[in-house]
Image: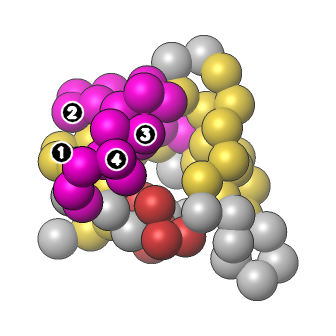
Amino acid sequence: MKTLKEVKIGETVKVVKLHGEGAVKRRIMDMGITKGVEIYVRKVAPLGDPVEVTVRGYELSLRKNDAAMIEIE
């Protein structure tokens, strides 16, 4: 299982599954990250947190903990 946290800068990946529960999972889905959507990794901060991605045509910053809940292929 590969997560969004492990993706390199410049890669485009597809979401397979969201892990997590309740409010956290709901918040990720509200940001437009759902099963089947493509995510392009734009930047990663020097210490790896946060990760800047492009989803559905807009830019988004995700914490490492949130990125670890997003399973990709």
- Give the distance between the C-alpha atoms of the residues marked 2 and 4, in whole angstroms: 17 Å
Q: Residue at x 29, y 31 (%)?
A: 34
Residue tagged 3: 27
Image location of residue 28, percent across then percent down: 41, 41
> Where is mark 4, residue-wise?
23
Are the two marked residues, 4 and 3, in contact with CB atoms closer than 8 angstroms?
yes
The region drawn magenta spans 20-40
Please give the count of numbered marks on the rendered protein.
4
The numbered dot on residue 16 is 1
Q: Alpha carbon of mark 3 to alpha carbon of mark 1: how far?
A: 17 Å
Residue 37 forms part of the magenta stretch: yes
| Structural crowding at the residue carrying mark 2, measured as other residues with C-alpha within 10 Å and reported as few (<14), some (14–19) or many (≥20) | some
Q: Residue 33 location in percent, x, y? A: 39, 33
Mark 2 or 4, closer to the camera: 4
N-term-proximal mark, 4 vs 1: 1
Q: Are marks 3 and 1 in contact (CB under 8 Å)?
A: no
- Closer to the chain start, of discs 2 and 4, is 4
